[in-house]
C-alpha cells in the first residue's frame, strides 16, 4: 500500500510541476477556466458561509428558541448550502462526483466515519445528510467565518477530548446522526492513514449503527499539502462509497478501552484496505 | 467514606480490568502516560468508570493535575470528603 501511495504522489507532482519540461502532458478540461472558476467558487463559498453564519442562522436562533428544532433548521440551511456548492462545481464541470449508497446515511443514532482526503469531503457528507451533526476542528469555533455556522448548527468541537466524547455520546443517544473523520485532519498523500481512536470509542459508547464511507479523489486535489490553486490537469472526480455497517456486537464482550482498541484497529484496516483497492 | 487503601484497590482493579494491565505494574508511583500508557481517551473511560463506582458525577477536569496513580487516589479522596 505504501508503495502505491508513494507512486501516486510522484505522479501527482509531475502532474502539477512538470509543465515546462513535459509538454506532452496536456492541461485538459478547460484548465484555466477551471482554475479561475475554482478560485471564484471558493470566494463565494466563504462569503455564503459567513452570511449564513452571521445573518441567516442568528435569525433562525431568534425564531426558534427550542434547541433541537433550531439545530435541525440550522443544519438544513447549511446542508442546502453545501449541497448547492457541490452541485454548482459539478454543473460548472469543475469536478465530477459519484456518491454510491448515500440513501443508507442519516439513520437515527448512526455514526458515520469517513476518511478525509480533500478539503470539501464534509460538503458531500453533510450536504447529502443534512440532519447529521459533525465533529469539527475546535479552531472553527474561533474562526470568524465559520464560527456562527458551527455554533448555530450545534456541531461538536473536537477538543478537549472528554467534552468531545461526552457530547458525541449524548448526540447519538438522542438519536442524532453523527459524522466523524477519525483521522482528525486531512490525509497527507503518500503518508499512511493516522486515525485517532476517538471514533471507535464513541461508536462503542453510543452508536446504534456504525457506517464507513470511503472517499477518493482522482486526480488528487485540495489535499493537505497543496494550496487550492494547484488544481489538477484534468477534471478531478470524487467517489464516495458507503460501505456495509460494522457489527458493533462483536466488540461488546470486552471492557470499553480494550474493545475500542480492537474496533479502532479494524477500522484502520478497513480504510487502509479501501485505499489499496483504489490505487 | 473509603480508606486510601480501599481506593487504591478499586483503582488498581479498574486499571487491570479496563486496560488489561498487570497488577504488579499498578503501583502508587506509576505514571499514567509513560508507565501505564493511558492516553487522553483512556482517561475519559477510566474517569467514567470510577465515577460509576464511587457514585459521583465528576468532571474529567477534576483530574487535570493527575499524573500518577497516587495523584488519582488523592483526588478521589478529596472528592469523597467534599
Image (cartoon, coloured by chain):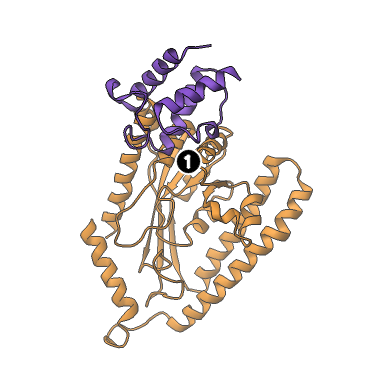
Chain colours: A orange, B purple
Looking at the rendered image, the quarter that the C terminus of chain A falls into is: bottom left
What is the residue that sits farthest to the right in this orientation? A63
Residue A128 appears left or right of A188: right
A69 vs A228, nearest the viewer: A228
At horizontal 40% and vertical 26% (from top left) the residue drawn is: B69
Q: Is residue A262 above or below residue A132?
A: above
A248 vs A227, nearest the viewer: A227
At horizontal 76% and vertical 54% (from top left) the residue drawn is: A59
Q: Is residue A128 above or below residue A106?
A: below
Looking at the rendered image, the quarter that the N terminus of chain A falls into is: bottom left
Q: In the image, residue B42 lies at what x, y percent?
A: 41, 33
Q: In the image, residue A212 lies at what x, y percent?
A: 40, 45
Number of numbered tags placed on the structure image: 1
In this view of the protein, can residue A253 be seen by the observer? no
Location of residue B34 by image quarter: top left
Q: Is residue A207 above or below residue A235?
A: above
Return the chain for callout 1: A
Q: In the image, residue A18 lies at what x, y percent?
A: 30, 82
Q: Badge 1: how crowded within 10 Å, few (<14), some, or many (20+)?
A: many
In this view of the protein, can residue A127 be seen by the observer? yes
Residue B41 appears left or right of A174: left
Q: In the image, residue A236 lies at what x, y percent?
A: 40, 69
Q: Is residue A76 above or below residue B58?
A: below
At horizontal 49% and vertical 47% (from top left) the residue drawn is: A103
What is the residue that sits farthest to the left in this orientation? A3
Element under label 1?
Answer: strand
Residue A193 appears left or right of A68: left
For disc 1, the marked residue is A111
Amino acid at each position: 500500500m505504501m508503495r502505491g501511495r508513494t507512486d501516486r504522489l510522484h505522479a501527482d507532482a509531475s502532474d502539477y510541476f512538470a509543465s515546462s519540461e513535459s509538454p506532452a502532458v496536456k492541461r485538459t478540461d478547460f484548465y484555466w477556466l477551471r482554475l479561475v472558476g475554482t478560485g471564484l467558487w471558493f470566494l463565494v463559498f466563504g462569503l455564503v458561509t459567513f452570511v449564513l453564519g452571521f445573518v441567516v442562522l442568528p435569525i433562525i436562533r431568534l425564531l426558534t428558541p427550542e434547541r433541537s428544532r433550531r439545530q435541525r433548521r440550522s443544519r438544513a440551511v447549511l446542508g442546502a448550502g453545501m449541497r448547492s456548492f457541490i452541485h454548482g462545481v459539478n454543473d460548472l464541470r469543475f469536478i465530477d462526483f459519484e456518491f454510491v449508497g448515500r440513501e443508507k446515511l442519516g439513520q437515527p443514532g448512526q455514526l458515520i466515519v469517513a476518511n478525509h482526503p480533500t478539503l470539501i469531503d464534509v460538503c458531500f457528507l453533510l450536504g447529502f445528510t443534512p440532519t447529521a451533526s459533525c465533529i469539527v476542528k475546535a479552531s472553527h469555533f474561533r474562526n470568524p467565518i465559520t464560527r456562527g455556522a458551527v455554533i448555530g448548527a450545534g456541531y461538536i468541537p473536537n477538543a478537549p477530548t472528554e467534552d468531545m466524547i461526552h457530547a458525541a455520546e449524548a448526540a447519538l443517544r438522542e438519536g442524532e446522526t453523527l459524522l466523524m473523520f477519525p483521522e482528525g485532519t486531512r490525509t497527507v498523500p503518500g503518508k499512511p492513514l493516522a486515525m485517532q481512536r476517538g471514533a471507535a470509542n464513541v461508536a462503542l459508547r453510543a452508536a446504534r449503527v456504525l457506517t464507513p464511507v470511503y472517499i477518493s479523489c482522482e486526480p488528487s486535489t485540495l489535499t493537505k499539502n497543496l494550496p487550492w490553486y494547484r488544481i489538477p490537469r484534468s477534471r478531478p472526480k470524487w467517489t464516495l462509497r458507503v460501505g456495509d455497517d460494522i457489527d458493533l456486537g462483536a466488540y461488546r464482550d470486552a471492557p470499553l478501552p480494550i474493545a475500542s482498541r480492537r474496533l479502532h484497529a479494524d477500522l484502520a484496516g478497513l480504510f487502509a484496505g479501501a485505499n489499496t483497492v483504489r490505487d | 467514606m473509603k480508606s486510601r487503601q480501599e481506593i487504591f484497590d478499586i483503582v488498581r482493579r479498574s486499571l487491570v480490568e479496563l486496560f488489561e494491565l498487570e497488577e504488579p505494574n499498578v503501583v502508587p508511583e506509576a505514571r499514567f502516560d509513560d508507565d501505564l500508557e493511558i492516553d487522553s481517551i483512556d482517561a475519559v473511560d477510566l474517569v467514567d468508570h470510577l465515577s460509576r463506582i464511587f457514585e459521583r458525577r465528576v468532571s474529567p477536569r477534576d483530574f487535570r493535575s493527575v499524573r500518577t496513580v497516587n495523584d488519582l487516589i488523592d483526588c478521589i479522596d478529596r472528592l469523597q470528603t467534599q
